[in-house]
Amino acid sequence: MTYPSRPPGITALCCFFLFGAVVSGLAAVMLLFSGSVLEPLWRLNPSAREGFAAMGLWAVLLMAVVCVACGAAALGLRRCKRWGYWTALGILTVNLVGDTTNAVITHDWRTLIGLPIGGAMIMYLLTKRSVFAAQDRTHVGPRLSAGLSYVILLGGMFTIAVAVYTILVSYSSLPWRDTWKYIATIAKGESPLSPSWLWRQHYEHRLVIQKLFFVVDLEMFHARQVFLFASIVVIQLLHLGLWGWSMRGLGRWRGALWRSGVGLAAFCIFCPSPWLNYTMGFQVCYVLSPLFATLSFVGLLLYWTDSQRPGKPPSSRFLWLSIFAALGGTYSLANGNLLWPLLVAAALFLRLRASAVLSFAITGAVSTSLYFYRYVRPSYHADPIASLGTPLRLLEYVALYIGSSWVNGAIVTAGVIGIIGLAIALVVLLRTPYYVRTSRAFALQLVLTGAFCVGTAVITAAGRLNFGVTEALQNRYQTFALLFWCSLGLMLLEYAFSLRAKQYRFLMAQICLLVVLVRGAILADHPIQEAQAHGFGDRKSVV
């Protein structure tokens, strides 16, 4: 097979990426087989060895991904293929952004040395775009996207394994402080199934469903948290399965798009960043709430799509599914009360039958009234009305809440990322009428999910602003922050895939998604260590 003539500069870039593939592959092998005959090579860069050692197995995965990416770029550039051009450009851009971010966060300005070199390579590639043949692009692009989709899906499955691993290495049968309050109440003679105890406030929440899970763990497993941790994993698997089904059923996603979407959803749902979910059985309420929220939105949209079929009324079972799921969310965590205004607004916007709108409105009004009947606001929490009077601090808190998933404690960076995410979400929200006109049910699910997560951040800020904006960095809040980024990422994936005339946009979106997975792998070591330290502290207390 003959290829277009390659300029010397492209040949040099081929050698550069080939060298990168060899070095990263060699690093992966040395990390996987520590103490081998290759061990002396670490003397060339001992600091890199220390950094990789801190990452554990994630370092092997990272180097393997870099090896494959660099090898693909070298091969594609050698053959003067468009996919090779875009892969090389993507790697250089990611490296450029990574060096800049690393310099800003760690203040290690030596990393900026590579910026002129990387920038020069990018500029050279941009000037040589005409060299790369467009032939066979309709065949190579989909094959490459299919391959990347399997890698992304594998990354999501690996995240599930990491979540289970986190539970196992940090497990302690000793309950956490919130659970001790339950045990103390029951030890005083109150029945764990009494309606008064189940309904009683726990801070600002009415955790009726979570308390039922606790009762099962207490009665059958002696409050050793075994049932609670198993329930957390099962609930998250159900949540992932629901997302995977809605991608196919509501979004008609297939093939590479579906696999990429499921991989992203698995990563966001099982990410170890909210490590309290994997060290405290009490946190079952934090995984129940997003599951019920997603189920309520899916039920609503199934009812809407069913109502669009001519000749027959929509099935009421979807309506009841949405209502009961919203009730489940309300009595799993306080933010479940947000589901009612969202469902009513969506029902009005979708022009559902008046009976459906009234069903949501009346059930929501009754549920909310019951929830706040004899409700007592915790005295040490901020007054939500007063918090609304400081909109800039409220926005700062929400931005940190949303952006905290990307960094470990870097406040300024988290705030900037959060603002960018909120701005993109606003653009997506403004496109809602278009999604309704084109019957894009899954896109509407993503809009509702994003709105629910932002609403959760706002009401959390309104009630806890007095603790300071840095309180938004609490790891348990990342459960909803990650769900926000999941909905945003899935929306961008769908948008990139829809540009069929420019199919390499989807390929670039997949590469960006791989970068996110790698970034998550780099950050994962910190929450796992925190979880282990938490579990060790509990076990030490027992001793």
Image (cartoon, helix red, strand yellow):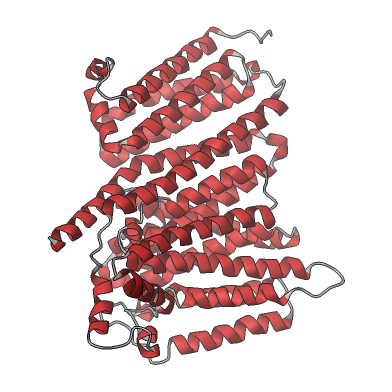
Q: Position of residue 8 (x, y in %)?
A: 53, 7
Q: Is residue 278 left or right of residue 362?
A: left
Please say if 229 is above or below 327.
Answer: above
Residue ranking furthest to the right: 311
- Residue 302: name its quadrant: bottom right
Residue at image location 65% in from the left, 70% down from the top: 300
Figure quadrant of the N terminus = top right
Q: Nearer the viewer, residue 323 or 451?
A: 323
Q: Is residue 477 left or right of residue 409?
A: right
Residue at image location 51% in from the left, 53% down from the top: 486
Residue ranking furthest to the bottom: 374
- Residue 60: name its quadrant: top left
Residue ranking furthest to the left: 543
- Residue 366: name its quadrant: bottom right
Q: Is residue 198 left or right of residue 423?
A: left
Q: Position of residue 362 (x, y in %)?
A: 60, 87
Q: How many marks?
A: 0
Q: Nearer the viewer, residue 218 or 472?
A: 218
Q: Position of residue 123 (x, y in %)?
A: 51, 23
Q: Position of residue 226 (x, y in %)?
A: 34, 63
Residue at image location 39% in from the left, 58% down from the top: 478
Q: Is residue 490 left or right of residue 355?
A: left
Please say if 336 is above or below 44.
Answer: below
Please say if 110 is above or below 532.
Answer: above
Figure quadrant of the C terminus = bottom left
Q: Is residue 431 visible?
A: no
Q: Is residue 142 visible?
A: yes
